[in-house]
Amino acid sequence: MVIKKLVFQTIRFALKNAFRKKLVAALSIVGIAIGIALMVTLSSASAGFDSLLGDAVAETVGDVEVQEYDTQITLSQLPKNISDIIRTIDSSDKILALSPEVVVNNFRQFADNVTIEGGMMGPGMDMSAVALGAKGVNPDDDATFEGPTTKITEGQLFENDFEVIIADYILEGGSSVFTLGESFDLPINYTYTVPVTIVGVYDAGEEMTRILDPGFVMSVNTSLQINTLSLPFEQEGYNRARIRFDSESVDETDIYIAELEELEPKLSVTGLGAEIESMGEIMANFEIFQTILIIIVIVAGGMAIVVAQLMGVSERMKEFAIMKATGWKNGSIFLDIILESITIGLIGALVGFALGGGLIFFVQLGAGQTFVTITWQIVLQVLAYGLGLGLAGGLIPGIRAARIKPMEVLRAT
């Protein structure tokens, strides 16, 4: 009972003394909070992007794109029977979906007329140009990928030439050019135009991935006619083909890619899962830089506690001498200093966590997207850093205070 009372009194005494010098304590807390806020922000961003990359790799692990070998996508010419050719590979039974496509570039010239919301780049910039791409598909093939033709939310699927369906994000931006049920003029080589009618709107999905689908989707016949009007030759075949294999890993997909590369005509083959997975190496380098930066900033915050506590011990030499003379043990005095440091460290960590969380909130609010993730591991890191900084910051001052000799201090005063 007596021991519990002494421990309680020591803790209460330490908490009271932690803020004896309010300005010094506040500066120490601010120093720690800045480091913790940086750690929370960077770690959350890293965790968020890792999660996005992981989901993207999982979704595309078996996805492959092929086009004519060593040719730009807009000039690529795959034969009309490319689907039959692809299905001659040994692993054809692993093909879950196959969709030959025609790439149409004329629609990018409308980028200035579209505002893409959800934190994407503004009108007229590169991201808008990518989003306003167009493609021609066979609805049956597109359906195997659960593509745009299966996600119509308004209107209907194209049935006639020069009819298109449009991505919902284009209309969400408040475009004055594109309206469901209306026609617009598509310039061809800046010399004449052809009327194109919007007959449907499709759901482009989540904000972070919606721009992966082109803004306009039409029939293969329509896309071939538009490209033939634009190109110096008559286009008859496809530009590319999308393939989805029943694959559990990027390495397994590489086996199927090797088989595709043996086909005639020769193909350029790209594994989408591997492309996204390679971005993880960039994230790994970022995480190394992030770790170094966090260590530097947090060490600086820890030094703030050390300096503050050393100053406090120097100013309280007489107080500690009296405490020891009245029966305080070395361990109790050491515990008092450690508890003071831990108090400052944990408060600084909590303030830093709040600052980091607030920064994340406002960044995501401004971007209009949720891409940063605060995980329970980050919360544990915050508490561990606060506790660790408190222990490290109070160690040297605590030892110094515990070694005070009452007679020498009192004689010096």
Image (tube, grey):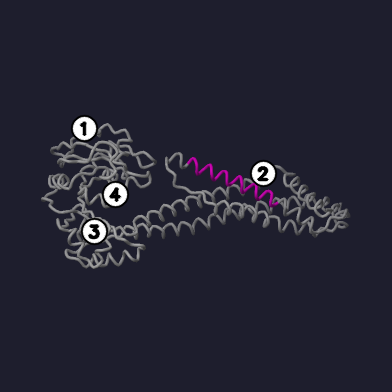
The rendered magenta stretch, by its main secondary structure, is classed as: helix
Q: Earlier in the sequence, mark 3 or mark 1?
A: 3
Q: Earlier in the sequence, mark 1 or mark 2?
A: 2
Q: Earlier in the sequence, mark 2 or mark 3?
A: 2
Q: Which of label 4 and label 3 is nearer to you? A: 4
Q: Amino acid at mark 3?
A: Val
Q: Which of label 2 and label 4 is nearer to you? A: 4
Q: Earlier in the sequence, mark 2 or mark 4?
A: 2
Secondary structure category for the residue under label 1:
loop
What is the distance, in whole Å, between disc 4 and disc 3 at their CAs?
Answer: 19 Å
Q: Which of label 2 and label 3 is nearer to you? A: 3
Crowding near the residue tagged with mark 1, few <14, some 14–19, many ≥20 C-alpha atoms within 10 Å:
few
Position of 130 with respect to 372 (left or right) is left
Residue on which the image places disc 4: 146
Q: Amino acid at mark 1?
A: Glu
Q: Nearer the viewer, residue 252 or 283?
A: 252
* Depicted 14 relative to depicted 61: above or below: above
* Depicted 104 relative to depicted 397: above or below: above
Secondary structure category for the residue under label 4:
loop
Position of 250 with respect to 385 (left or right) is left
Residue 66: assigned label: 3
What is the distance, in whole Å, between disc 2 and disc 4 at their CAs?
Answer: 57 Å
- Residue 81's image quarter? bottom left
Secondary structure category for the residue under label 2:
helix
Q: Residue at x 16, y 63 (%)?
A: 265
99 part of magenta stretch: no
